Amino acid sequence: MTGYALPIKRLIGELGKLPGIGEKTATRLATFILRASEEDARRLAQSILEVKQKIRFCSVCFNLAEGGLCEICMDPSRDKNLICVVEEPESLIAIEESGSFRGTYHVLHGVLSPLDGIGPNHLRLQELLKRIAENGAEEIIVATNPSVQGEATALLINKSVKPLGIRVTRIALGVPVGGDLKYMDRMTLAKSMEYRRGL
């Protein structure tokens, strides 16, 4: 970063802290911001501050919300007896965009990862159990990622919820629509066989 004035170096350094942003991309973004109008730069800065000041966790599902409850928990048309458990808000958004789910959610904000020091107490699992105890549920759909950590988290949820007499299901895993078997990895094919269903 030699040759840049100190304020630009600082901006590149801050942008480089964002996930998936390397030094070259951070430099391109900083250059773009530098060339943008002062009004555009002000709006960007204001948007960042507004998110930090106004966005909180929903008091029910721990999704991101502007108030005490997120839009999904406030929606009276949602089936409150159906709770889909996801790792992060981004997973919730992906399921919502599919348009196939009309229940509610519970966001764990992570997965079990003992090597990273993340155990059951670091997840929003106790809040899920409390929510079920207070409001009941007919089915818990576990929608964690098909990684080692996601699978371990799914097993933990199943072990914690099953004794309550509630049905626990796991999202299907396997070959994507339009996929070609010869290009699938072993784990995907193994899960496809494991979660096969009748025609």
Image (spheres, grey):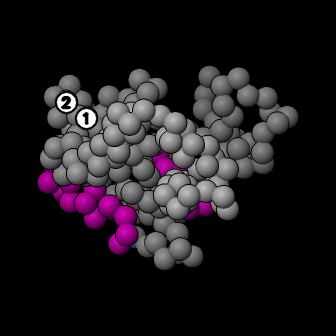
Label 2 crowding class (10 Å Cα cut-off): few <14, some 14-19, many 20+?
some
Whether residue 4 sits left or right of residue 161 in the image: it is right
Mark 1 in CB contact with mark 2 (< 8 angstroms) = yes
Q: Please report the residue visible at 37 percent of the width from the left and 56 percent of the height from the top.
A: 108
SS of the residue at dot 1?
helix
Estimate the x, y position of residue 9 in percent, counting from the top left. Answer: 55, 59
Whether residue 188 sits left or right of residue 132 in the image: it is right
Q: Nearer the viewer, residue 51 or 49?
A: 49
Q: Please report the residue visible at 24 percent of the width from the left and 30 percent of the height from the top.
A: 78
Chain part drawn in magenta: 121-150
For mark 1, what is the residue?
A: 72
Estimate the x, y position of residue 19 in percent, counting from the top left. Answer: 54, 54
Residue 101: say if magenta: no
Separation (CA) of disc 1 from disc 2: 5 Å
Q: What residue type is disc 2 on?
A: Asp
Q: Is residue 30 above or below residue 158?
A: above
When asked about the image quadrant of residue 81, the answer is: top left
Q: Is residue 125 above or below residue 144?
A: below
Asked whether the viewer can see residue 193, the reply is: yes
Whether residue 36 sits left or right of residue 56 in the image: it is right
For mark 2, what is the residue?
A: 75
Estimate the x, y position of residue 67 in percent, counting from the top left. Answer: 16, 44
Q: What residue type is disc 1 on?
A: Ile
